[in-house]
Amino acid sequence: AITAGGSNFFVGVRENTHPRCVSLLSLLSSRYSLFHSSSHSSPPSPLPSLSLSLCISLMGDHFTSSFTVADKSADEVFEAIKNVRMWWTGAIEGSADNIGDEFTYRYGDMRYSKQRVAELIPARKIVWHVVDAELTSPQNRTEWKGTEIVFDISAGDDGKTEMRFTHIGLVPQFECYKNCAYTWCFYVDTSLPHFIATG
């Protein structure tokens, strides 16, 4: 359990997760606490690549991650995900409220993507289709284009809600995989659950 802003949230860890991965997520959480309480508008600087590569190597083909949040309903998790500006740090323009809506994400000169809301099942699922992308680091700057960002939500009988995130098409063969996985580790395993837990 991680305490954030007076509320508890729980980061789901797979059975075969390497202890260094757990340490990475804990470090991300502590770094986010400092970031969230400051006036900075950008995420912390990257963590050492060794810890990151250990974590990425256990994530499977498509990047995926999950967490469980206590005392929050599936509806609350669903609505929090749609409120993109509150957890995906960067310049967000557009809307993610309805099917067919489009929004853009831009992080300085480093990263740009445009998403279209492809599926919305209240309290259960959100799917964004990446219709355009411009990344600065890999030679293939449009690697994200055509991929899908999926949020699967399920409510448990114990009062906890699980959110499983999958970026379908973001695979280890991509040049950007390591950097993108690090970024998703921050936003999905730290920023989003913190926002869900604290509002």
Image (cartoon, rainbow, N blue to C red):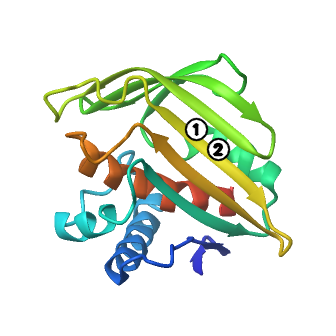
Q: Taking 16 as reference, is 187 above or below it?
A: above
The residue sitting at 71% across, 21% down in the picture is 99
**Looking at the picture, how far across and down is residue 153, in whole percent?**
71, 52
Few, some or many C-alpha atoms within 10 Å of disc 2 (few <14, some 14-19, many ≥20)?
many
- Pointers 2 and 1 in contact (C-beta within 8 Å): yes
Q: Residue 84 has which mark?
A: 1
Q: Residue 81 has which mark?
A: 2
**Looking at the picture, how far across and down is residue 51, in whole percent?**
24, 71
Seen from the viewer's position, the closer of residues 10 and 140 is: 140
Q: Taking 66 as reference, is 123 above or below it?
A: above
The residue sitting at 62% across, 45% down in the picture is 151
Q: Residue 103 has which mark?
A: none
Question: Can residue 43 be seen here?
Answer: no
Q: Quadrant of the C terminus?
A: bottom right
Q: Taking 185 as reference, is 85 above or below it?
A: above
**The residue positioned farthest toward the front in the image shown:** 61
Q: Amino acid at mark 1?
A: Val
The residue sitting at 47% across, 54% down in the picture is 64
The residue sitting at 79% across, 54% down in the picture is 74
SS at mark 2? helix
Q: How many marks?
A: 2
How far, Cα to Cα, is label 2 from label 1?
Answer: 6 Å
